[in-house]
Structure formats: C-alpha cells, structure tokens
Image (cartoon, helix red, strand yellow):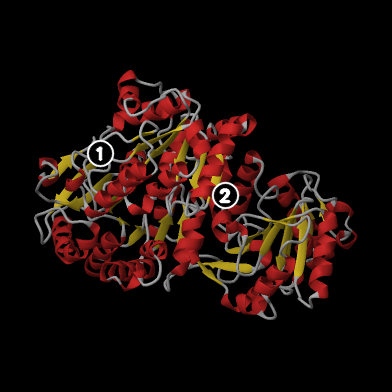
C-alpha cells in the first residue's frame, strides 16, 4: 500500500521542527510526523510520501528543498504553487489549484500511483478532491481544527469574516467528499463536526493518536533549562503551574494569566511558567501570535506579577521533557486553558512526566481525563474556575496522587503502534470492500461491555467462530454512543458489526456497501422522536435529589444519562409521570440511569432490525449481561445471558425463557447460539 499525505500548512521538515515558528507550525505537524513514523513500521506499506508546499524566505532554506528522504520508505516532497513565499492558513486557498496541478504532475511521474491520499486540514482536502476527480485516487480527511469551532469562540458575526467563511465552506466540502474522516476524540466526532451540514457520524472514526511518552517518564530536570525559567522568579522553589502552547488566541493563555492574577491565594501557593513558543522579536511574529504575546505581557504588568511569572523567549524540542520534569520536581501541575483542544498531546506528555492536569472541557481533554483519571476539567472561559481547580489539586494531596497515578496509564492508552494498526486496517478495508450480507438468514445481536468484550481469549474464539457463520448477520446493542462503540470494537479487533444499535437503542446504524462506514437509520429516528420532549424531560429532572448527570458526551439527542441508585429511579419515574412526560427509564449496574423516548430500547431496536431483514423470531439471537439488556432479552425468545451477568439478571421474572450460559463473555454467546440451534434442529 502506498499512502500519500498532503499537508500544506506550516513549516514541515523531516526532523528538528521548530514548533511555534509560525502560527501554523504546531500539533498537526507533530501528529503527521509521528503517524508516518509508526506507519513505516508496517511491512505491508511499501511507500509513504508527505507532500507539502515549497517556499522561500525568512524561515530558512530547508523549505525550498524539493525532496527530503526520511527513511527507506518515507519521503517528504515539496511542490511549488502559485506563490513562492510562505503562506499563512488564511491565504492558503489561493494556492490550492496550483498545488493540485503540481501534485498531479508529480503523481504522473511516479512508477505507481498512491492507493490513498490522507489530507490534513481543509485546504489539503480541497487539493485531494481535485486529484480524486482527475486521477480517481480516494482520500481520507483529518481536520485537526475546525472553522466552526473557531467561529463559536469568536462569537456573533464571526462567520461573516470572508476567510473564516471560506474555510468553513472548504470543510463542508471535505466532509461531504472524503471516504472517511479520522478524528482524535469523541468531542471532535460528536460535538465539533455536528455543526456542519455535511456531518455524517457513520463516516467518522475516532483514532486517538499516540505519543512517544517514554522519554517524558524518564526525564530529569536540567540545570540549563531550570536557569532559563528561574531567572524570572523570586522564589523558584514554589510549585509550578506550567503551560506549554503556541501564543495564539485559541490557546487562551491570557485567561490563565487572569486566573493567576486575580487569585492572591494561587500566587502565594505557586509560580506560573508560560512556555509560549519561540520568538526573537514580538514584532516579527505572525499577527495572532504577536497580539497574544502583547496581551500576556500587558496582563503580567496589570496584575504586577513580576517575580512570579516566567515567560522565556525560546526553548527547543529537546528541552520539553526537562521542562515537564522541572515542574514535577517542584510539585507542580500542567494547565491547558485552550478554548478548544482538538486532542492535546501536551496533556499526555505532562501526564507521563508525573504532572496532574487542569484542562479545558472543550475537545480531546474530555477523552484523556476520562480514560486516564489524570486531572480536572474546567470551563476555559471562567478564570475563577481555572484558579479553583489549580488550588484544589495543590491543596489535596490524595487527589494529586490519584491524578499522578492516572497519568502513568497514558502510555498504554495512547500508543502510536495501536493507532497505526487500526488506521491501516481501515484503509485496507476501504480499498478492498467486504459488503454486508444482503439477505441474512439469521441475526445475532449482543451487548458489548462484559458480553462481547471483557475477555481477550474469548473474543479471539468468537472472531474465528464468526468467520465460519455463513448467513448470520452480526450486530451489537450498547449503551455507548456510535463512536465510543466503534472505538472499543476496533481496539479489541472485534468482527465489524453489520448493524450498530447504540445509545441504549435510541440510535441505529447500518454498515454501508464499502464495509467500513455506516448510515444512520432515519426511519428509526422518526419512530423514537415521536412524543419525545427532551428539554421538558431534562427540566423536570433538574435538581432531583440523588440524580447526577453523566458527562456531556453521554448526553444524546434521544438519551439523557445520569448516575442514580435504585431509590432515585423510582423518584425519576414518579416525577416524569407527574409532569405527564412519556419516557423509558432504564437502570443498570445499580449506578447508571438512562432516560429515553418511550419507543426506544435495545429490545424495540432489535425488533426494528429484524423486521427490516424480514426474519422470523426463531432466526434472531440476543445476548447480554446487565440491566440495560433486559428489554432486548425479554423481547426475543432466543435470549442468552452470559455467565458473568450482573443486576441479578438470571432471576429476573421476565427472563425465565433465557438461556443462562455456563461460560462467560463471548464464549457464553457462542454457547447460547449453539443451544438454541440444537433446540431448533430437535424441533424439526
């Protein structure tokens, strides 16, 4: 397989990238280089090329070199476009057509055309769309950051800006035309992209990037780096509040300085260290970066923070591990106050270094903190909340220690080799489609957590068993969202489901003919929408004692999710009945409470799919392990309860017809299907 990456923005080179050199030389370049390095380890990849713009000027001679070999299978090529000079992202649209012509000319000279193009940012997707139309090479898309998100940060009227409107239009076109959209977080997939007319959740995959975290875990402070920081500080030994980001408005460093400046308690407790890119002269920086640095300096002066805030002019990539280590040695923490952080590699680096986090609640940090338990999330627009979270971590040793321990899990959770394996599997599947069964004779639908997954050995057996089941359509029914479910299934190398029943039955997705992407079942959406008064239900339950909302990503258009005990469930049902609101209330594991439209459940969703396939009841098998599977198990005669069940499922009065397997997890599914097939055979 030959993959061609297209990335027009920033100052890209094979090594020694000067991050922060320009406003566009940031995380997407780090992502690309790390992805390519991991991809190159796959023996099934013959060639990887990164194509970027060739330009001349003040940033150095390297960017005018047409070709830069990186390894035996990786090359960076720089191609000319209309302008010979560096172009900021706002001006890149003018280079798209000319760069696309240069790229197609380069492709024509190659002994073999690329199998797939991966476009990074919308301008690269515009190039890829031109190439696909002319050469027939499909493309996948990674946005890295989105114009609509930026517009929401800037407020009313922002989308009237011609540059931003043009960018959003290019993103709409990219979402509509890309074969697959690859994102780094659920927030990106489920919230940020949802504002686009071309949003299609079934064509989006969440693949968290990895990070080379070992060097951060092993790093120690360096006297040279400490001296660069300490010369600003009156009392360098105090704990460090460390921020490391380019000085652009989106990174919101000014809010952190405000939080610190407005909290005398925090000033007494810690120093603030701002590693804000690299600069020789503020006036020589790109406009956004220059404005941000001036804002930071003005705020330091306004609050008279001299001696308590460090803001070195330069640092190299080789210094970063020691910067984190210095903050760790002083009992500090890492702060990311960005208005939106699409992923957040610096959060993983800081965690691996032993630093707890205070991070924005907008974007990838939601996933990182949920996965690792390594910090606190805050509203980045609320300086008092930022200060309060910092003080809480500094003043609660037990919480600090838990976050440090959680951060140590980051290396296992975010691994480039795992990312590359999933990424390549998706590309190969797109290039060699395995379409779903058009007319299945049987249907198996099972829960994911603690049923299909939870035992690696059992899932391996299930994978081999599934490959031999001709005529059997395989589906899952889960409380997870579509993207959360797909992530866990692909991480575990599960067989790809033909049907995805997600969010406790309130959403259904069907596998497309390409065997990779999915299409939402709009007919089912219409069914569950009837009579559903989401805002009224949320208002009726607001403030109910014992009811605590789950995280924002667990709330869906047709699902409200809470934490609650059994007594609170009764209060929820009574409250809704008193308000005259119809809803289906489902409690599981003694902790999780989902409030759904009355028509929605795993059971009714399976019935809908069965009807679509035209299957009789005896052709459908369902399997589960907990309380949110009751509706599905009750509704089907061939119901399987795996041996590791919870919620006293096997004693449930409505499930006496179920088969309780002797084996757990996926082995129990196989055992149950075999049991019912023997019964059918005996019945003749």
Q: Where is residue 560 in the image (x, y as percent from the top left)?
A: 67, 64
Q: Which of 69 and 33 is in front in this view?
A: 33
Residue for point 32% across, 62% down:
138
Q: Position of residue 605 (x, y in %)?
A: 68, 69
Residue for point 40% across, 43% down:
303
Instruction: Determine the secondary structure under disc 2.
Output: helix
Q: Is residue 29 above or below residue 330?
A: below
Q: Is residue 11 left or right of residue 207?
A: left
Write down the residue under mark 2: 488
- Pair 2/1: label in front: 1
Distance of label 2 from label 1 (alpha carbons): 39 Å
Q: Quarter of the image containing the C terminus? A: bottom right
Q: Is residue 110 left or right of residue 652?
A: left
Residue neighbourhood size for the residue with mark 1, other residues' Cα within 10 Å, grouped as few (<14), some (14–19), many (≥20): many
Taking the view exactly as shown, the residue that stands out farthest to the top is 223
Q: Where is residue 137 in the image (x, y as percent from the top left)?
A: 28, 62
Q: Residue 278 carries which label?
A: 1
Instruction: Determine the secondary structure under disc 1.
Output: loop
Q: Is residue 339 above or below residue 335?
A: below
């Amino acid at each position: 397989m030959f993959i061609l990456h297209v990335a027009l923005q920033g100052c890209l080179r094979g090594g020694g990238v000067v991050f922060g050199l320009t406003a566009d030389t940031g995380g997407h370049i780090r992502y690309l280089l790390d992805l390519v390095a991991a991809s190159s380890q796959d023996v099934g990849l013959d060639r990887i090329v990164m194509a970027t713009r060739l330009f001349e000027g003040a940033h150095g001679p390297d960017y005018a070199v047409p070709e830069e070999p990186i390894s035996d299978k990786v090359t960076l090529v720089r191609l000319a476009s209309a302008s010979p000079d560096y172009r900021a992202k706002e001006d890149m649209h003018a280079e798209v057509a000319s760069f696309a012509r240069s790229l197609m000319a380069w492709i024509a000279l190659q002994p073999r055309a690329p199998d797939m193009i991966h476009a990074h940012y919308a301008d690269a997707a515009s190039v890829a769309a031109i190439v696909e139309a002319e050469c027939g090479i499909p493309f996948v898309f990674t946005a890295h950051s989105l114009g609509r998100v930026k517009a929401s940060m800037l407020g009313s009227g922002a989308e009237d800006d011609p540059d931003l409107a043009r960018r959003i239009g290019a993103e709409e076109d990219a979402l509509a035309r890309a074969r697959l959209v690859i994102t780094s977080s659920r927030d990106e997939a489920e919230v940020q992209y949802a504002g686009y007319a071309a949003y299609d959740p079934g064509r989006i995959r969440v693949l968290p990037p990895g990070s080379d975290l070992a060097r951060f875990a092993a790093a120690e402070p360096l006297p040279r780096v400490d001296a660069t920081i300490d010369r600003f500080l009156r009392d360098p030994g105090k704990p460090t509040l460390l921020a490391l980001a380019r000085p652009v408005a989106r990174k919101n460093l000014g809010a952190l300085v405000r939080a610190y400046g407005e909290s005398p308690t925090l000033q007494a407790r810690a120093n603030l260290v701002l590693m804000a890119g690299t600069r020789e002269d503020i006036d020589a920086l790109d406009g956004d970066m220059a404005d941000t640095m001036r804002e930071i300096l003005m705020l330091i002066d306004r609050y008279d923070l001299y001696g308590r805030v460090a803001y070195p002019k330069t640092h190299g990539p080789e210094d970063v591990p020691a910067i984190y280590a210095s903050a760790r040695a002083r009992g500090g923490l890492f702060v990311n106050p960005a208005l939106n952080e699409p992923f957040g590699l610096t959060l993983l680096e800081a965690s691996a270094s032993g630093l707890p986090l205070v991070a924005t609640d907008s974007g990838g940090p939601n996933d990182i903190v949920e996965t690792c338990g390594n910090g606190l999330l805050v509203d980045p627009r609320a300086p008092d909340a930022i200060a309060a979270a910092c003080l809480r971590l500094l003043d609660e040793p037990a919480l600090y220690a838990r976050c440090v321990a959680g951060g140590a899990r980051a290396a296992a959770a975010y691994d480039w080799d795992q990312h590359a394996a999933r990424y390549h599997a998706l590309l190969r599947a797109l290039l060699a489609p395995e379409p779903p069964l058009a007319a299945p004779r049987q249907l198996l639908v099972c829960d994911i957590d603690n049923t299909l997954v939870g035992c690696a050995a059992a899932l391996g057996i299930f994978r081999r068993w599934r490959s031999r089941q001709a005529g059997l359509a395989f589906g899952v029914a889960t409380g997870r969202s579509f993207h959360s479910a797909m992530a866990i299934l692909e991480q575990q190398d599960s067989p790809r489901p033909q049907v995805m029943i997600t969010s406790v039955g309130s959403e259904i997705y069907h596998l497309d003919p390409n065997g990779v992407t999915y299409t939402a079942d709009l007919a089912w959406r219409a069914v569950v929408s009837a009579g559903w008064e989401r805002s009224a239900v949320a208002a009726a339950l607001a403030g109910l004692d014992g009811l605590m909302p789950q995280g924002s990503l667990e709330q869906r258009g047709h699902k409200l999710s809470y934490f609650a005990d059994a007594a609170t469930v009764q209060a929820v049902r009574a409250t809704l009945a008193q308000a005259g609101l119809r809803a289906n209330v489902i409690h599981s594991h003694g902790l999780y409470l989902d409030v759904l439209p009355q028509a929605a459940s795993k059971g009714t969703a399976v019935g809908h799919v069965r009807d679509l396939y035209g299957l009789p009841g005896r052709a459908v098998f369902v399997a589960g392990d907990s309380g949110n599977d009751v509706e599905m198990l009750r509704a089907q005669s061939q119901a399987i309860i795996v041996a590791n069940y919870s919620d006293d499922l096997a004693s449930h009065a409505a499930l006496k017809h179920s088969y309780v397997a002797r084996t757990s997890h996926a082995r129990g599914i196989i055992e149950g299907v075999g049991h019912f097939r023997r019964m059918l055979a005996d019945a003749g």
